[in-house]
Image (cartoon, rainbow, N blue to C red):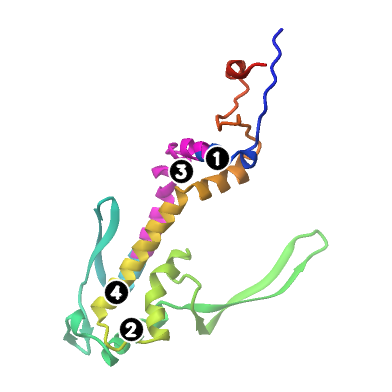
């Protein structure tokens, strides 16, 4: 009969160095935190891009530079009162006029919810509807995902504080640069120790680790190096 005396810890009880080792191991797992975990978000972000570019008549491609994504894009046609314009020449009141043509395409019909209650069986009921005439920002008008709001940030920022000297081309360059920066930041955060640690604590809080961060799998061989 063998007897062992060993200390085991949950993730939140480990030292910072041990937590970092655990996160390093999990980060290497493509299933949990690598490319596979990013595919769904990438599909949703591309769906937002597709709808946005469809609304504004833009053709785009995603390219890579030093492992960072960027968008190559151009307007298919810029029609201003029946005349073709260069997007670099549209600014000031003409930029406002151009954006106003699409204003209701980037808003959502106002949402109302009322009469919320539980019935005698504990089932929740509520009445809801969308206004036929009132519109509002922030309700993800393209795909219903939060990425719709990300891609519209710079346009609404311009509406709130117009820069009369910026061109249509430069404004949309800001739109796409901002969108891709948020995309990269999201991927970077997903791979960070902070995010991985939160996932471990929330989903695998019952896992046990040795003091140095090695995971304990209930195997007796793992205990031999620290047998008492």
Which badge, 3 or 2, is on the more N-terminal residue? 3
Which badge, 3 or 1, is on the more N-terminal residue? 1
Q: Which residue is mark 1?
A: 19
Q: Where in the figure is residue 97, as x and y percent of width and height?
A: 31, 89
Magenta residues, start to end:
21-49
Magenta span: helix, strand or loop, mainly?
helix
Q: Where in the figure is residue 87, as x and y percent of width and height?
A: 20, 80
Pick out the residue farthest to the top.
Answer: 1
Whether tag 1 and tag 2 are in contact, CB under 8 A, the answer is no
Q: Which residue is mark 2?
A: 99
Q: CA distance from mark 4 to mark 3?
A: 32 Å
Which badge, 1 or 2, is on the more N-terminal residue? 1
Disc number at residue 33?
3
Q: CA distance from mark 3 to mark 2?
A: 39 Å
Quarter of the image where the N terminus is located:
top right
Task: Rate crowding at label 2 as few (under 14), some (14 to 19) or many (20 or more) other CA atoms within 10 Å.
Answer: some
């Amino acid at each position: 009969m063998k007897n062992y005396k060993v200390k085991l810890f949950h993730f939140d009880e480990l030292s910072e160095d041990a937590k970092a080792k655990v996160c390093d191991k999990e980060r290497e797992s493509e299933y949990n935190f690598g490319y596979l975990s990013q595919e769904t978000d990438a599909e949703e972000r591309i769906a937002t891009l597709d709808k946005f570019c469809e609304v504004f008549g833009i053709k785009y491609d995603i390219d890579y530079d030093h492992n960072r994504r960027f968008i190559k894009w151009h307007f298919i046609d810029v029609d201003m009162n029946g005349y073709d314009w260069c997007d670099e020449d549209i600014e000031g009141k003409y930029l406002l006029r151009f954006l106003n043509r699409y204003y209701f395409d980037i808003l959502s019909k106002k949402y109302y919810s009322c009469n919320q209650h539980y019935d005698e069986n504990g089932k929740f009921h509520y009445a809801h509807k969308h206004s036929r005439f009132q519109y509002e920002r922030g309700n993800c008008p393209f795909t219903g995902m939060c990425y719709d709001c990300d891609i519209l940030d710079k346009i609404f920022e311009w509406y709130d504080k117009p820069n009369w000297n910026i061109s249509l081309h430069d404004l949309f360059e800001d739109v796409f640069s901002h969108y891709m920066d948020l995309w990269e930041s999201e991927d970077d955060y997903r791979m960070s120790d902070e995010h991985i640690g939160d996932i471990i604590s929330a989903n695998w809080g019952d896992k046990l680790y040795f003091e140095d961060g090695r995971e304990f799998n209930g195997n007796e061989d793992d205990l031999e190096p620290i047998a008492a």
